[in-house]
Amino acid sequence: MVDPFRFCLRETGGPEVLAAEMIDPPRPGEGEVVIRHEAVGVNFIDTYHRSGLYPLPLPSGIGNEAAGVVEAVGAGVEGLREGNRVGYFSGPLGSYATHRAIPADRVVKLPDEIGSEDAAAILLKGCTAEFLIERCARVEAGETVLVHAAAGGVGSILVQWLKALGATVIGHAGNSRKAEIVKALGADHALCCPMEELAGEVRAITSGKGASVVLDGVGAASWEASLGSITRRGLLVTFGNASGPVPPFTALDLLRTGSIFVTRPTLFDYIATAEEMRASAARLFEMIQSGSVEVKIGARYPLIKAADAHRALEDRKTTGSTILIP
């Protein structure tokens, strides 16, 4: 049995600011459950919190996503009991821990077919894919969609989900090895060209029209390529900042390729209620159980080595999902 510990942010900066602290075994408050984590998900948003790109009041926990076993149930909790296998992905921050108490209304029960490692690898990323495709962009069969960072944690799920819906998928990746992964995921076109050439490649593939939807989690480095790749009245969804935030732009920039729409959504506005959160997770579980989406775990790190996982993520050395094992 591992002695309980957690990571606490007391300052922002590089991966070295991630510091582990011993804790007393948590007890559930009213409306809470205590979970013994079996796996913890690592997401790019964690690096934004750690670096200060997304400011937090300090000290703060870190991490949104984990899966494990309920060890204790607080007063007023219904529908959960000790021994239930559960996961969560919508905060509050603090999943980089061996154990934690968390509001029961932010927890979902896991189907028997989905293990803790798979759940921690895919809940946040998979529900991000769900809202981006089905509730934000509302992609329909036959549409052409450009996916940036298509071999990454979210990107690899987007590619599979879009193909299951009948979309034509153009996946862009950072190198030829990652492009091969994107092709194997089912993308119709897997590209690894420089960003300055990407719009031309997309135009060539689409007979000059461009993609009807661009799903861009890269940010600054891909912004111009995304603008150049979109079709008339198309939708550009910028949902991440892996290379830094999107540069300032004006409304006139949206005229460049024809009255395009731009949105900057976040998962947490699409799972604001317990009902929305559980519906999103249920849709994800449906896609996994049908075989439409496969969980891709690219790397496992001991929880105590969380800083190493952050370095690999920021250095673009990862594919699929990265998880931490307590």
Image (cartoon, rainbow, N blue to C red):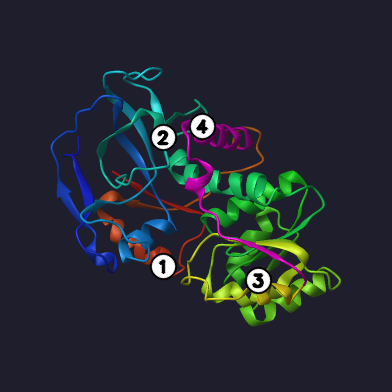
- The answer to whether residue 192 is seen in the rendering is no
- The nearer-to-camera label among 4 and 1 is 4
Residue under the point 24% across and 52% down: 60
Estimate the x, y position of residue 168 in percent, counting from the top left.
Answer: 77, 56
Disc 4 marks which amino acid?
Arg
Disc 3 marks which amino acid?
Ser
Query: Is residue 1 a member of the stretch shown in magenta?
Result: no
At label 1, counting other C-alpha atoms closer than 10 Å, the crowd grade (few under 14, some 14-19, many 20 or more) is: some
Q: Is residue 124 left or right of residue 175?
A: left
At label 2, counting other C-alpha atoms closer than 10 Å, the crowd grade (few under 14, some 14-19, many 20 or more) is: many
Rendered image quadrant of residue 270 = top right
N-terminal of the two: label 4 or label 1? 4
N-terminal of the two: label 2 or label 4? 2
Q: Which residue is mark 1?
A: 314
- The span shown in magenta is 258-287
Question: Tag on residue 299?
Answer: none
Quarter occupied by the C terminus:
top left
Q: Please, what secondary structure does the residue beneath circle 1 have? A: helix
At label 3, counting other C-alpha atoms closer than 10 Å, the crowd grade (few under 14, some 14-19, many 20 or more) is: many
Using the numbered discs, state the Cα–Cα distance from disc 4 to disc 3 in whole angstroms. 32 Å
Question: Tag on residue 226?
Answer: 3
Q: Please, what secondary structure does the residue beneath circle 4 have? A: helix
N-terminal of the two: label 3 or label 1? 3
